[in-house]
Image (spheres, rainbow, N blue to C red):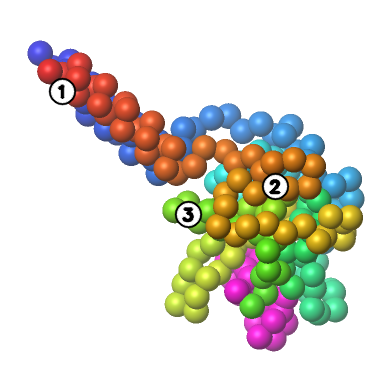
Amino acid sequence: FWLKPAAVVVAMIFSVVTAVCGIVSPVDRSANKCLAPELRFNVERLRDLHGYVCCKNEHYAEPRGAYDCDGACDPLAELEPPIIFYDSQCGIPLYKAPVGRSFEEFLEESHHHGWPSFRDEEVIENNSLVLYPSMEVVSACGTHLGHNLPDGQGNRYCINLLCAAAFEGPNSTVTYDRASSTTPSPGGSLELQPSYGHRLRVSAVVVFAAMTFWQ
């Protein structure tokens, strides 16, 4: 008699985990082929282990503090501002920083959070998209960039430096419809992985099946 309620409880736990985190699967660290052959900001040290973050991913990130060696190095501080950050897959410009604040403020915020952090004024229009409700930030080329994590100052785009470290590319004029999540990109369509909404639908099916079994 305990099998049916137990099945519903297990299904509900599975559904919550699936909806919030996605179904856990082994990380394919070989999925880094989308990255340009040469990258800036001393991120080559991250390519082999964390390149998949940019290429085949929707919620993982490079390690916190990896971009500045946990404070032991700072490849951005050595450059002359403002710095333009280009998509590591196709080279389109994504961010220009600092804008509306000092270079020191930009570096301090990025170091505090462990990833380069950009504000609305620093976003280069039409080359990136925030997906709702997951808040994932994706470029017009389909590159996973990071997430929008708003705070008391407004939108804060927490970006993996590895994914925005290319030299300027030939497709730097690409644009798209910001309202669309299936935006044409250079060389094809933007392929997005299963969204938060998709996970919810899967979860609903699992719960429904378990409840049907209980009746």
Mark 2, Cα crowd under 10 Å, few <14 / some 14-19 / many 20+, is some
Residue 95: name its quadrant.
Answer: bottom right
| Segment colored magenta | 97-120
Q: Is residue 147 above or below residue 200?
A: below
Residue 117: name its quadrant.
Answer: bottom right
Under mark 3, the amino acid is Tyr
Labelled disc at residue 5: 1
Asked whether 24 or 145 is in front, the reply is: 145
Mark 1, Cα crowd under 10 Å, few <14 / some 14-19 / many 20+, is some
Residue 110 in the magenta stretch? The answer is yes
Q: Is residue 208 left or right of residue 201?
A: left
Q: Is residue 131 left or right of residue 2?
A: right
Element class at badge 1: helix
Labelled disc at residue 132: 3
Element class at badge 3: loop
Under mark 2, the amino acid is Pro
In contact (CB < 8 Å): disc 1 and disc 2? no
Query: Mark 1 or mark 3, which is nearer the start of the sequence?
Result: 1
Residue 192: name its quadrant.
Answer: top right
Label 1 – label 2 distance at C-alpha: 47 Å
Mark 3, Cα crowd under 10 Å, few <14 / some 14-19 / many 20+, is few
Q: Is residue 64 left or right of residue 92?
A: left
* Percent x, y of residue 25: 53, 30
Labelled disc at residue 184: 2
Label 3 – label 2 distance at C-alpha: 19 Å
Query: Mark 2 or mark 1, which is nearer the start of the sequence?
Result: 1
